[in-house]
Image (cartoon, rainbow, N blue to C red):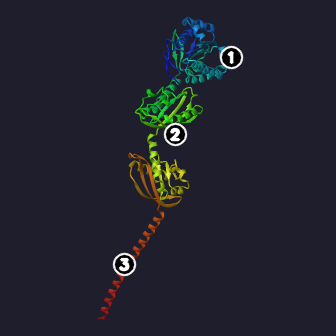
């Protein structure tokens, strides 16, 4: 919704934005004239469609007469259909009773027709003197809905309530459902405002400021376009990607920036988006950078043409130029080494920089019990227990960050069984040396490890036996010496 300010025409009320819904408590016919005549005079002068729904003490004839005193060419405005002055029975109760849904729909239809006819929006008022006590609660509910609806449209609305017919609790009900209320005290108009509503609006404002800050500083591009593809809003991040400032893009057609070769596809996708709620922007399309180079963008959007606050497509677009270039480089590497990889006994895989698989050979696929083509786009979380997948991911990130080859042997426990793997991982790089993914080669060395363990145990046993044997030989020599010594002594 546009938030450009409109002149209220009322001396004590400043300029107000579209969507303002306020009220007036009056005690006399003159109170209504003081408020509503300058209000509608300003609307007529500012190319707004005006609608005055009257009730006593200022009926249709009285309203026309009072307005004509200030707007001398009122008949011309009436003739060209810029203002309607109706009795409440022609609007609020034209079916014989008050129907909130019908009235609300009527206001939005009037606004739509006004804009289609070239008017800036709808300026309206309604007097509630006709309202009976039995209808009060349903009317207050209606006012709450109207307050919400008007905020989303190019509308300004003043609701007039007779102060003499309102009790204290009813005054509170009215104030809570309007941005502010005007009441005359000691001959001067003053404002009433609900503290709860004020706090709520302040909270909304803070939220809006927060989300604006998020959008303004987002690494992605946030863009809103109308049904013709004209840019209504674009975040400042566009300058980082395309070199253009916000002001250079807003008001221009998105199709002016798309590469001619991609225009047919983008046009077809946009046409489909006109009739769907969810829309996928082309997987990738090229746009012209201000310096003459090309960037590749992709995004996702939602059709909010029916939302009066937006009336367009809201899209989140990312610059994927580097990613696409990396994918091309990886595809080239994949094609180059595919034949070799398929004929090696080792398990081989390639992942992109987001650590999603783009290739594996048959030996790796066989272990995962899938076909080689099924691995594309999957991650380790799709095949391994969470803890193991997280370890693999951590190792892969470390390889890409350091840009160095790792050669390690590791022991794992899976399904109660122990196994060993020898893994070599290397960062995949493009021609400029940028890391664009990871290449991994590994093989199961469990049997080798078992043999090595068995060999180690045998060596230990031999060492024990050897040490024990050496001890026996030394003892035999000592015994022989002792025997010889005994013989000598016996011989004497």
Which comes sooner in the sequence, label 2 or label 1?
1
Q: Which residue is mark 3?
A: 470
**Image quadrant where one finds the C terminus:** bottom left
Numbered circles on residues, count: 3
Q: Can residue 113 be spotted in the picture?
A: yes
Q: CA distance from mark 2 to mark 3?
A: 78 Å
Q: Quadrant of residue 478?
A: bottom left
SS of the residue at dot 3? helix
Residue that appears at 62% across and 23% down:
141
Residue 428 is situated, as x and y percent measured from the top left of the image, at: 42, 49
Q: CA distance from mark 2 to mark 1?
A: 53 Å
Label pair 2/1, CB-CB below 8 angstroms: no
SS of the residue at dot 1? loop
Which comes sooner in the sequence, label 2 or label 3?
2
Q: Quadrant of residue 275?
A: top right
Q: Which residue is mark 2?
A: 283
Q: Of 217 and 210, which appears nearest the observer?
A: 217
Disc 2: CA contacts within 10 A as few (<14), some (14-19) or many (>=20): few
Disc 1: CA contacts within 10 A as few (<14), some (14-19) or many (>=20): few
Label pair 3/1, CB-CB below 8 angstroms: no
Q: Of 271 and 262, which appears nearest the observer?
A: 262
SS of the residue at dot 2? loop
Q: Can residue 387 be spotted in the picture?
A: no
Residue 45 is situated, as x and y percent measured from the top left of the image, at: 52, 12
Q: Which residue is mark 1?
A: 94
Residue 86 is situated, as x and y percent measured from the top left of the image, at: 63, 12
Give the residue furthest to the right. Answer: 96
Dot in front, 2 or 3 = 2
């Amino acid at each position: 919704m546009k938030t450009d300010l409109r002149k209220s025409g009322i001396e004590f009320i400043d300029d107000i934005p579209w969507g303002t819904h306020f009220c007036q408590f009056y005690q006399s016919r003159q109170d209504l004239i003081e408020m509503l005549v300058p209000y509608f005079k300003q609307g007529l002068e500012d190319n707004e469609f005006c609608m005055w729904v009257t009730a006593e003490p200022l009926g249709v004839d009285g309203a026309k007469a009072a307005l004509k005193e200030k707007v001398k060419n009122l008949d011309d405005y009436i003739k060209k259909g810029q203002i309607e002055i109706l009795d409440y029975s022609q609007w609020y109760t034209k079916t014989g009773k008050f129907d909130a849904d019908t009235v609300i729909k009527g206001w939005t239809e009037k606004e739509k027709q006004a804009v289609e006819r070239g008017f800036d929006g709808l300026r309206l008022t309604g007097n509630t003197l006709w309202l009976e006590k039995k209808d009060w609660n349903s009317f207050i509910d209606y006012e709450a809905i109207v307050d919400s609806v008007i905020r989303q449209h190019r509308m300004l609305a003043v609701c007039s309530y007779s102060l003499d017919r309102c009790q204290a609790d009813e005054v509170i009900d009215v104030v809570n459902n309007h941005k502010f209320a005007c009441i005359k005290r000691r001959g001067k108009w003053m404002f009433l405002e609900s503290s709860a509503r004020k706090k709520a609006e302040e909270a909304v404002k803070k939220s809006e400021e927060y989300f604006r800050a998020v959008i303004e500083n987002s690494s992605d591009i946030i863009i809103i376009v109308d049904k013709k593809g004209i840019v209504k809003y674009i975040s400042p991040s566009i300058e980082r990607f395309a070199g253009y400032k916000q002001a250079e893009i807003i008001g221009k057609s998105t199709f002016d920036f798309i590469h001619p070769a991609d225009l047919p596809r983008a046009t077809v996708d946009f046409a489909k988006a006109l009739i769907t709620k969810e829309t996928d922007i082309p997987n990738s399309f090229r746009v012209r950078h201000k310096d003459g180079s090309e960037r590749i963008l992709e995004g996702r959007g939602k059709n909010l043409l029916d939302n009066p606050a937006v009336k367009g497509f809201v899209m989140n677009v990312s610059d994927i130029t580097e990613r696409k270039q990396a994918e091309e480089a990886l595809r080239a590497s994949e094609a180059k080494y595919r034949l070799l990889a398929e004929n090696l006994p080792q398990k081989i895989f390639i992942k992109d920089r987001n650590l999603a698989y783009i290739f594996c050979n048959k030996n790796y696929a066989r272990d995962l019990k899938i076909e080689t083509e099924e691995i594309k786009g999957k991650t380790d979380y799709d095949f391994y227990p969470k803890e193991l997948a997280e370890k693999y991911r951590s190792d892969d990130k470390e390889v890409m960050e350091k840009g160095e080859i790792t050669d390690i042997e590791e022991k794992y426990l899976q399904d109660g069984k122990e196994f060993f793997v020898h893994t070599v991982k290397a960062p995949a790089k493009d021609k400029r040396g940028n890391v664009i993914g990871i290449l991994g080669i590994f093989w199961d060395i469990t049997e080798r490890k078992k043999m090595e363990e068995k060999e180690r145990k045998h060596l230990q046993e031999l060492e024990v036996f050897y040490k024990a044997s050496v001890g026996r030989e030394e003892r035999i020599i000592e015994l022989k010496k002792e025997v010889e010594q005994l013989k000598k002594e016996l011989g004497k």
